[in-house]
């Protein structure tokens, strides 16, 4: 029991921006309007943890119009759509990495850039705010229209030096005549935070990389970091939306003392032998990724979302492929595919369910082994179409299992709101110990929740550990929360991960 507790605490997500030992929660409001008619400029609400859980006191609202934050709130920026947290300067306060992949830079629409907000005893602050564009990386590259630099962001310690590093996707980067081939850039952390020293650019034409660039591959559609070979350094999984005849793929770059490196890199698709599932046009294999140690062997495993996978005669019901880690990295041995048609899994695979559209890994039952949370975004539930649900599959020494799996939806597990048409419950998911009791708590967004006459306002539900079963509901109209709940804000569409 003691060893299991130690393992649990070691893998419990942090996201502690004020360093007080309680996890905090950054909530994307990526369709929040800015001043002066800046429609869908985007914003981020931050709720801070305490002994009683997440609280309104001290909560923050950040946008590109906040004092000290670089850039400017403009229409369709979608600030807050993707976020990742990490301690880039190793000062004990987590920092927030924010991708703004649709940001215009001068005359370049959709070039994109990335913000870094650093933590402090008072929480996130704009005092050391950094703004990164491609020309700031020191690699001789420049922003171009529609590169989408910052389309996804992910933290990981790729060189094992104790400072978190940042991976940044530019999914529509052109490589010579190859349009929308995609690229991923890495900034390394240090005592002063992220810096350009040793920065890297990766694409499928990089020396030593398996595969090759293709038109509209979109290398960098999704990112996830995990230690797939158990060597103590983070590795990077990169989704490639249109790889393998438009069915999708995932590339793995392994960490080393010098950071991410080409030796041992892998390219995974459903075309590979022993990878389960059928490669089909526009499956979107790899559009969602999550890394976790689902069998507790010390090497992380990779969950790969295939939200448009068909099963039998069911169209776009979705599935999740699992590749297990080992001292040699990810392998096909014991590779699995899970869907709502898998034996023992609750629910039924139905047309357009999109099982696997969002994924999250973490230990929710305190057994020292990570569990898998699968969003079923368009699950119809209790007569409500596309209400959404979250399937929870528990890890075990044998890996992910159907034993004791369960389905969470609005109206279940103590959640007050009932399922309604188009809520998309599960579009955002996060784990953290918000009340500091040693148990993981689960935050779930329903970004298309209507409130009164306002549509698609959004709500965030928090379930306080499987043992306690206390719940909270948060909106921008909750007392003490900055901002205002408005139609089409999509509050809770994303969380920092």
Image (cartoon, helix red, strand yellow):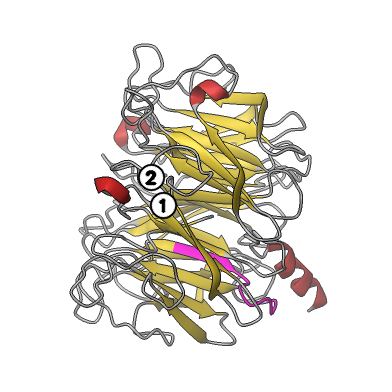
Q: Residue at x 37, y 28 (%)?
A: 172
Which of the labelled discs sits on residue 285, or is there none? 2
Q: Can I make out residue 251 in this image? A: no
Q: Is residue 46 left or right of residue 461?
A: right
Q: What is the chief secondary structure element of the magenta stretch? A: loop
- Tell me which corner region of the image, top left, top right, bottom left or bottom right, holds residue 384: bottom left
Q: Residue at x 73, y 37 (%)?
A: 192
Give the Cα separation between the discs numbered 2 and 1: 6 Å
Q: Disc 1 marks which residue?
A: 305
Q: Is residue 192 left or right of residue 421?
A: right
Rendering coords of residue 395 (x, y %): 58, 67
Q: Can I make out residue 300 in this image? A: yes
Quarter of the rendering occupied by the N terminus = bottom right
Front-most of residues 408 and 313: 408
- Tell me which corner region of the image, top left, top right, bottom left or bottom right, holds residue 345: bottom left
Range covered by the magenta-colored residues: 429-438
Rendering coords of residue 200 (x, y %): 61, 25
Rendering coords of residue 342 (x, y %): 39, 67
């Amino acid at each position: 029991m003691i060893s299991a507790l130690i393992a649990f605490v070691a893998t419990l997500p942090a996201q502690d921006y004020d360093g007080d030992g309680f996890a905090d929660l950054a909530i994307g409001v990526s369709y929040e309007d800015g001043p002066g008619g800046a429609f869908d400029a985007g914003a981020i609400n931050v709720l801070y943890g305490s002994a009683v859980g997440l609280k309104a006191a001290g909560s923050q609202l950040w946008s590109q119009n906040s004092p000290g934050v670089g850039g400017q709130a403009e229409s369709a920026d979608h600030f807050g759509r993707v976020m990742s947290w990490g301690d880039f300067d190793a000062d004990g306060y987590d920092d927030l990495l924010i991708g703004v992949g649709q940001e215009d830079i001068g005359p370049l629409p959709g070039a994109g850039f990335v913000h870094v907000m650093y933590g402090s005893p008072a929480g996130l602050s704009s005092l050391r705010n950094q703004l990164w564009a491609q020309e700031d990386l020191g690699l001789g590259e420049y922003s171009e229209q529609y590169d989408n630099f910052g389309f996804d962001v992910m933290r990981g310690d790729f060189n094992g030096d104790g400072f978190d590093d940042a991976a940044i996707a530019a999914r529509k980067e052109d490589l010579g005549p190859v349009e929308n081939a995609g690229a991923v850039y890495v900034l390394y952390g240090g005592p002063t935070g992220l810096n350009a020293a040793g920065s890297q650019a990766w694409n499928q034409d990089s020396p030593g990389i398996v595969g090759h660039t293709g038109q509209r591959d979109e290398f960098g559609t999704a990112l996830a970091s995990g230690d797939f070979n158990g060597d103590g350094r983070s590795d990077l999984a990169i989704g490639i939306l249109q790889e393998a005849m438009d069915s999708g793929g995932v590339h793995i770059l392994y960490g080393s003392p010098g950071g991410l490196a080409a030796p041992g890199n892998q390219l995974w698709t459903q075309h590979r032998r022993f990878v389960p599932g059928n490669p089909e046009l526009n499956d979107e294999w790899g559009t969602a990724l999550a890394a976790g140690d689902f069998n507790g062997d010390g090497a992380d495993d990779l969950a790969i979302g295939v939200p448009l996978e068909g099963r039998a005669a069911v169209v776009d019901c979705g599935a999740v492929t699992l590749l297990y880690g080992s001292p040699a990295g990810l392998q096909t041995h014991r590779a699995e595919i899970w869907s709502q048609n898998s034996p023992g899994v609750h629910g039924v695979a139905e047309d357009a369910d999109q099982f696997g559209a969002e994924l999250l890994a973490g230990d929710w039952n305190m057994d020292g082994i990570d569990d898998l949370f699968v969003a079923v975004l368009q699950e119809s539930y209790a007569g409500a179409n596309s209400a959404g649900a979250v399937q929870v599959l528990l890890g075990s020494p044998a890996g992910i299992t159907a034993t004791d799996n369960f389905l969470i939806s609005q109206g279940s597990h103590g959640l007050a709101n009932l399922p309604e048409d188009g809520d998309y419950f599960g579009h955002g998911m996060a784990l953290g110990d918000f009340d500091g009791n040693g148990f993981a708590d689960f935050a779930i967004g329903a970004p298309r929740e209507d409130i009164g006459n306002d549509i698609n306002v959004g709500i965030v539900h928090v379930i306080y550990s499987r043992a306690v079963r206390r719940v909270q509901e948060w909106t921008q109209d909750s007392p003490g929360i900055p901002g205002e709940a408005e139609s089409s804000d999509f509050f809770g569409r994303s969380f920092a991960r």
